[in-house]
Image (tube, rainbow, N blue to C red):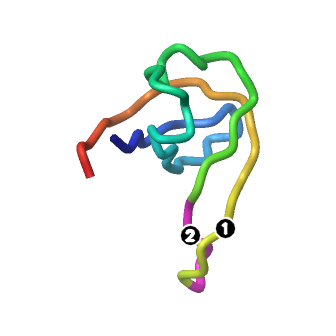
Amino acid sequence: MKFKVLLDDQTVGTIDGDTLDGQHAREFIGEIVNVHLHDESGNAIERRGRLVEVLEETDY
């Protein structure tokens, strides 16, 4: 499962459910997490920040 999430600095990225030890991303709201996203050039990057909201979840 993948989760599209919002960080406290308004960054939107994804968290792979495999990295959460079977837990749901909602359980980490308020915690510092690493998210994956792409920069303006399309390069994959990772950002760290406080999780504010889970926006969407997908099975792929």
Q: Earlier in the sequence, mark 1 or mark 2?
A: 2
Quarter-wise, where is residue 52 in the image? top right
- Report, in whole angstroms, how far the alpha carbon at label 1 lies from the one at label 2: 6 Å
The label on residue 58 is: none
State the SS at label 2.
Answer: strand
Label 1: how many residues lie within 10 Å, few (<14), some (14-19) or many (20+)? few
Q: Quadrant of the N terminus?
A: top left
Q: Is residue 33 left or right of residue 44?
A: right
Q: How many marks?
A: 2
Residue 59, x across and y down, in percent: 24, 44
Looking at the picture, tell me which residue is in the foreground, 15 or 13: 15
Residue type pointed to by label 1: Ile
Residue 2, x across and y down, in percent: 38, 44
State the SS at label 1.
Answer: strand
Residue type pointed to by label 2: His
Q: Residue at x 66, y 67 (%)?
A: 45
> In the current view of this chain or complex, which residue is farthest to the left?
59
- State the residue position of label 2: 38
Q: Residue at x 59, y 17 (%)?
A: 29
Q: Is residue 49 left or right of residue 10?
A: right
> Mark 1 near mark 2, Cβ–Cβ under 8 Å?
yes
The label on residue 45 is: 1
Looking at the picture, tell me which residue is in the foreground, 35 or 41: 35
